[in-house]
């Protein structure tokens, strides 16, 4: 089946904003809504159809917003209600849609639901997973997946940080709450969502208390997951006109149709992990992009999506993984390779998701001291490497190459401005001086720059959409 109708998002280019490091509008060194508003003309010039904002809600920031304390409010560092509304209006005025990131698998330990659950108040206790005896499951961030709670006098499950207790999606009330949260933001003009950690929502029945490791075969893409999410969608006010992206670790193309197929699919597209591992060894031992794997995976997803009457989504970078240039390209080949990666993505039909700075051809930032390890996942790895006897210099070099902190540094807007035009004061974490020559303003003025290549490829994609809304995928990178 061909894509049934032309939905606005079928050929959308989605630009991910990790907002702390995008642009600072109020001069406190932290990116914010006002900073985004100030750069909407740039994003419109680039040609993006939608922005995905990483979580904007109040959070103790154990995992930079992915530990939410109040889903209905806006983090004060991000901006106030009026600025948020202005952001939506100004984006819409330029034809840019806005997606929020909904963290549905877990809350913060500071969320009132978790506090009430710990205190044993009904109905909240059963909204999380509690055990008197933990099993030996480990969390994604390392260490045990069970944390002792003094108040509850028992352990709770956290697949991510201890500050991110997992919610029990088998509880209808949890699904109902999130449906109301989604409705709330849709009513405020949001155009869709990216759903965080979607594929671990459903835990195997009766979480085993026996020793068992690893937990992934009991929590990843479990049977019954689709039904739980469908129940949420049915109550949420979401329609096929909204753009919804699901973070889909563990989902195969074969299983995708039930999620995205027309008519009645639950999501626009899945951000699958099947091409997460794209490293192929080169003769000299350094990795290069495995183009065969990339194109095979991409084609498989496109075919599945097409058979299901819709389109697939593709991405190479996000806030959780190293920049493509650092992963696959020798520095001497970087500018040329940046153009090739741009073409590999944007010449494909379907949804393309970019991560801020990718359009500039940024490599990972170089982390120069311990304080620049701003991410807890990286910090845990650093501690583990230290315990293995690595020196600080070795650890910083390793995390610069592979870590999440190294892709979350402030964007360079203007090489001639203080702090690269990111902020009037010292940014919350340093902007990498090596990123300055790649700043947006300077690249904008250079027709041959990576930024201008992105712009032209996006424009060409949009022209193809206009001429032939049902284009077929070409073989990526070949
Ligand atoms: C995926 C997010 O992209 C990542 O940044 C976060 O740490 C985990 N989910 C947990 O929410
Ligand atoms: Ca700010």
Image: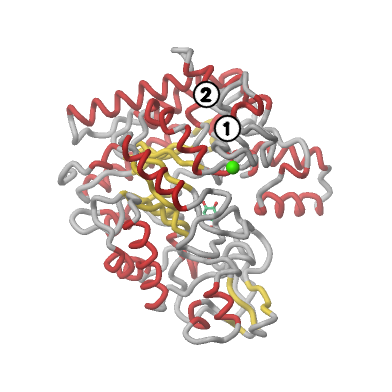
Picture coordinates of residue 347, whole percent (x, y): 33, 28
On the rendered structure, is 388 left or right of 82?
A: right
Circle 1 sits in a helix, a strand or a loop, which is it?
A: loop
Task: Name the residue at 54% across, 86% down.
Answer: 121
**Quarter placement of the C terminus:** top left
Report, in whole angstroms, how far the alpha carbon at label 1 lies from the one at label 2.
9 Å
Asked if 458 appears above or below 314 in the picture, the reply is above
Circle 2 sits in a helix, a strand or a loop, which is it?
A: helix
On the rendered structure, is 200 left or right of 429?
A: left
Disc 1 to disc 2: CB gap under 8 Å: yes
Picture coordinates of residue 350, whole percent (x, y): 30, 38
The one nearer the camera, 205 or 13, is 13
**Can you tell which mark lies on residue 440?**
2
If you read the primary sequence from the N terminus, does the residue marked by circle 1 or circle 2 appear first? 1
Task: Name the residue at 52% across, 78% down.
Answer: 207
Picture coordinates of residue 331, whole percent (x, y): 62, 22
**Can you tell which mark lies on residue 411?**
1
Task: State the image quarter where residue 368 is shown.
Answer: top right
Task: Name the residue at 44% across, 23% down.
Answer: 340
Picture coordinates of residue 101, whole percent (x, y): 45, 53
Mark 2: few/some/many CA within 10 Å (<14, 14-19, 20+): many
């Amino acid at each position: 089946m061909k894509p049934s109708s032309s939905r606005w998002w079928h050929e959308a280019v989605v630009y991910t904003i990790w907002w702390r490091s995008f642009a600072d509008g109020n001069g406190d060194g932290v990116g914010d809504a006002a900073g985004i508003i100030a750069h909407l003309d740039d994003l419109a010039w680039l040609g993006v159809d939608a922005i995905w904002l990483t979580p904007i809600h109040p959070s103790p920031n154990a995992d930079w917003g992915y530990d939410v304390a109040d889903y209905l409010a806006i983090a004060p560092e991000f901006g106030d209600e009026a600025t948020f509304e202005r952001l939506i209006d100004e984006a819409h005025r330029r034809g840019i849609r806005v997606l929020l990131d909904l963290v549905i698998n877990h809350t913060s330990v500071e969320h009132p639901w978790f506090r009430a659950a710990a205190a044993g108040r009904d109905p909240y206790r059963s909204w999380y997973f509690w055990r008197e005896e933990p099993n030996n499951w480990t969390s994604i961030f390392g260490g045990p997946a069970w944390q002792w709670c003094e108040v509850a006098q028992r352990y709770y499950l956290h697949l991510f940080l201890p500050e991110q207790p997992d919610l029990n999606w088998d509880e209808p009330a949890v699904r109902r709450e999130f449906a109301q949260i989604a409705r709330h933001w849709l009513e405020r003009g949001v155009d869709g969502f990216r759903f965080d950690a979607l594929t671990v929502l459903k835990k195997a029945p009766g979480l085993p208390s026996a020793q068992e490791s690893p937990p992934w075969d009991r929590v990843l893409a479990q049977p019954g997951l689709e039904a739980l999410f469908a129940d949420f969608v049915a109550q949420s006010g979401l329609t096929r006109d909204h753009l919804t992206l699901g973070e889909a670790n563990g989902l195969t193309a074969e299983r995708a149709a039930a999620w995205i197929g027309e008519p009645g699919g639950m999501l626009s597209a899945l951000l699958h992990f099947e091409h997460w591992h794209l490293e192929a060894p080169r003769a000299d031992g350094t990795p290069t992009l495995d183009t065969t794997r990339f194109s095979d995976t991409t084609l498989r997803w496109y075919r599945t999506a097409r058979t299901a009457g819709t389109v697939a989504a593709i991405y190479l970078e996000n806030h959780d993984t190293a920049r493509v240039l650092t992963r696959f390209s020798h520095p001497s080949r970087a500018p040329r390779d940046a153009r090739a990666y741009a073409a590999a993505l944007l010449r494909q039909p379907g949804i393309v998701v970019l991560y801020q700075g990718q359009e500039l051809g940024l490599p990972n930032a170089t982390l120069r001291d311990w304080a620049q390890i701003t991410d807890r996942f990286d910090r845990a790895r650093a501690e583990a490497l230290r315990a293995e006897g690595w020196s600080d210099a070795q650890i910083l070099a390793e995390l610069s190459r592979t870590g999440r902190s190294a892709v979350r540094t402030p964007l360079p807007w203007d090489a001639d401005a203080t702090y690269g035009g990111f902020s009037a004061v010292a940014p919350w974490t340093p902007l990498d001086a090596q990123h300055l020559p790649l700043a947006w303003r300077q690249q904008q003025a250079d027709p041959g720059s990576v930024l201008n290549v992105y712009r032209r490829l996006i424009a060409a994609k949009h022209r193809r959409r206009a001429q032939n809304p049902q284009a077929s995928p070409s073989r990526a990178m070949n």
